[in-house]
Amino acid sequence: MNPSIAPLANRKNCVLVIIDVQQKLVPVIEEARKIIENIVKLIKFSKILGFPVVLTEQQKLGETVTEIRGEIPDFQPISKITFSCFGSEEFRKHIRQLNRNTLIITGVEAHICVAQTALPAISDYTVHVVSDAIGSRSIHDWEIALDRMRHNGITITSTEMLIYELLVRAGTPEFKEALRLIK
């Protein structure tokens, strides 16, 4: 096993990355409502544990959907033209300044911007892709993206699995607050 790949995520090292969940793209994404719901849960959870959220918007695809925009205080998306978020100097700089080594990646499209962000990131970060918080226009492309990322050392997880992993234990005030998100 590669020692740089942590088997479990650690809340102190995480940053939630939300990629291109925008008005012009969402209507054609399979299971878009479920994906948005899970991203909103993860944003709320990030507030409970206090880890940062970074959001991108692909140019010319409209604004981020209202449900997500409304959950992020001081909403300031990073605009990009490249498919990979790392093609944006502003994104690279922002992520470096956060001084976190684990990227929790969500958004659309799984086989384009999500994969092209996650795959090169594994050389510098531990990467967790949240399978039920990413999507594509077709299930086939979503499946291929997950398979490719998994086979390249990216941890594939789910919203609930990640929440419990970062909580570590039951009975804490954070656990009680997070439980409302899950139930």
Image (spheres, rainbow, N blue to C red):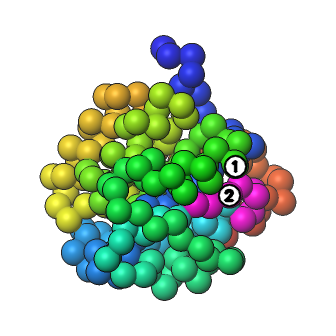
User: Where does label 1 land, which residue?
Assistant: 98
In magenta stretch: residue 53: yes
Is the residue marked by circle 1 packed among few (<14), some (14-19), or many (20+) residues within 10 Å? some
Give the foreground label among 1 and 2. Answer: 1
Relative vertical location of residue 79 with respect to residue 144 in this rendering, above or below: below
Q: Nearer the viewer, residue 101 or 47?
A: 101
Percent coordinates x, y for residue 72 in the rendering: 63, 75
User: Where does label 2 land, which residue?
Assistant: 52
Relative vertical location of residue 123 with respect to residue 43 in this rendering, above or below: above
Query: From this viewpoint, is residue 124 visible?
Result: yes
Task: Give the alpha-carbon distance from disc 1 to disc 2, as whole Å.
Answer: 8 Å
What stretch of residues is rendered in magenta?
47-54
User: Mark 1: which secondary structure?
Assistant: helix
Q: Are marks 1 and 2 in contact (CB under 8 Å)?
A: yes
Q: Nearer the viewer, residue 73 or 97?
A: 97
Percent coordinates x, y for residue 17 in the rendering: 53, 56
User: Mark 2: which secondary structure?
Assistant: loop
- Three-letter amino acid code at the position of disc 2: Pro
Percent coordinates x, y for residue 33 in the rendering: 37, 76
The reply, left or right, for residue 41 in relation to residue 109 is right
Mark earlier in primary sequence (1, 2):
2
